[in-house]
Image (cartoon, helix red, strand yellow):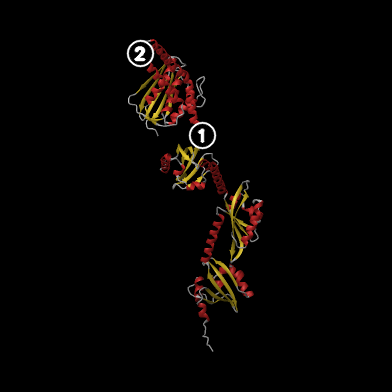
Amino acid sequence: MEIIPHLDLVEIMKQITDAFFVLNRNGKFKFINKRGAEILNRNHPNDLIGKLIWDEFPEVLKSNFHLHYYRTVMEKQIPVEFDEFFPEPLNRWYHVRVYPITDGITVFIHDTTDKKLRQKRNAAYYEQLFMKNHDGILLLDVDGKITNVNDGIERISGYSSSYFIDKQYFDLELVKREDLGLLRTAFQKVRKGDIQHGIIDIFHRNGAIIHCDITSFPVEVMNEIVGVFAIVRDVTQIKELECSLRRSEQRYRSLKYHNPEGICSFDLNGKLIGVNPALERMSGYSKEDFLQLHLEQLFHPKDIPTLNECIQDILDGKGTVDSFEITMINKEGYYVHTVVTVVPIYIDEKLEGFYFIFKDVTKAKKTEELLIQSEKLFAVGQLAASIVHEIRNPLTSLMGFLQLIEHSDGEKNEYLKIMSDELMRIHSITNELIVLAKPQAKKTIRESIPSLLNDVMKLMGSQAMKVGIELVLYSEENVPDIICDGQQLKQVFINLIKNGIEAMDEKPGKITIRVMRKDHHIIISFTDEGIGMTPEQIKKLGEPFFTTKQKGTGLGMLTTFKIIENHDGNIEIESEVGKGTTIHVILPIQSK
């Protein structure tokens, strides 16, 4: 049989770490451990043995310990447990457990001051988190009744806290009727332990609609769900911003995909980002085709260097490259004349890629060529009468000399030389007429401007002299030749001389033509002594069908402006009513 050693009960009670003491029925201390003495502010346990607790600590008589718990234990002989704050000199929180014994009570005291302070801090943190939270917070009980709200919900809704307290969460009048069912369903799921998230609309007190993002989650205490938190965040501005972004994106997509001009976009690595339908129609290639294409396949070889240069300008941060001509080769192999603009794509002020915007000018090009040819034919018609007159004069001379030769028996060489000169004049005039009337493909070679002007003056000289107008040419020495289409420039010069003659109303006078070099340009100036023009008339020159002449069409100046523009030049006009007009044609020596 195992022998159980004798246990010293007093020794065991001394080892209890909590404060522990025993009182008899009269309230005298029968035992107290060291920790108990420390808590009761005594140096040694013996300082309290045999003394009445009421005498040593009279403040206890007013405490809950004496008023409620001590009597309960003594009279009903049942244990009690409670938390109590003991004021000065203790000034501490204690968790007290009191157990009845045969001749009194045993008291266990655990210092919970630190725990209480932590709880108070946590409660303060909770209070700050709850009440000062920018978002709205509602605390619901398990039946869905609102028991507390914070200031955030007042700010979001415009209603005070009293409006919400004791109302059913899913019966609030400020919630849209169609959203109440969503709230009820979410609440029921949260009661089962789920976390719910959703967006609903509420009516602000001022009538405005507020978009709210609501997150609901259960409040658990000792593994039991005792309520529900609903956190309400006002996302109206975010929603409006999202809506604005969507509308902006839709406007961008509409601009891109419904634009009649072809548009494609690339990133900085040259990877295709997008192609609009207009470019697909223009090129004949689908978006999938574009992904497989190289620039050499889509554009004329002569335009590839220009295209690469423009792309490099974009990459170097030089901004938009505006309106240069380039020839596209469509899927069927036909040429499509386009005017291209390259626009950089910036995101957050950082270059991310670039757009190509293509305008199909193929029809405009054909119309322009027809217009130039039409103007040439129009000029031929006007010159026909004077040319016939010029040819008739030498023919009359030839006929007369032939008659003289026929009846003359003397020297005929003198007559033959004159006849040869007249025939050469007829040959020159007819050549100029053929050159002017015959359709010409545009071709550029190095030409001398003074030589072109001499040819034109030969052609126009007789028409000018017929009305008493002298054509005078002054040219600087060593004027450099330029790369140009000589036939087109002749057309320009003929138009300007013809306009000068008509502006002088066929009255005697002089048209002066000057050729000079200035920096990297050649300037050809035509000065007449005609009626002049007003500033308003000068502004309209070059518009189709605007003319200062009674029978003019305005197409001559339109053609003139276009030809000079195609030569990378420009035209400047000076005029004064009643004194005449000077037109400066400015052409680059080195054409682009």
Quarter of the image holding residue 24?
Answer: bottom right
Identify the disc placed on residue 412. 2
Examine the image and state in which quarter residue 425 appears.
top left
Please provide percent x and percent y for residue 272. 48, 47
Front residue of 157 and 284: 284
Q: Which residue is mark 1?
A: 363
Q: Is residue 316 left or right of residue 208?
A: left
Label 2 Cα crowd, 10 Å radius (few <14 / some 14-19 / many 20+): few
Q: For the residue marked with disc 1, what is the amino acid?
A: Lys
Q: Is residue 323 visible?
A: no
Residue at the extreme bottom of the image, as rendered: 1
Which numbered disc, 2 or 1, marks the residue that appears first in the sequence?
1
Q: Residues within 10 Å of mark 1 (few under 14, many from 20)?
A: few
Quadrant for the N terminus in the image: bottom right
Question: Could you tell me the amino acid type at mark 2?
Answer: Lys
**What is the CA distance from the residue labelled 2 to the residue labelled 1?**
60 Å
Q: Position of residue 7 (x, y in %)?
A: 52, 83
Q: Is residue 276 above or below residue 431?
A: below
Helix, strand or loop at label 1? It is helix
Q: Position of residue 465 (x, y in %)?
A: 42, 16
Displayed quadrant of residue 579: top left
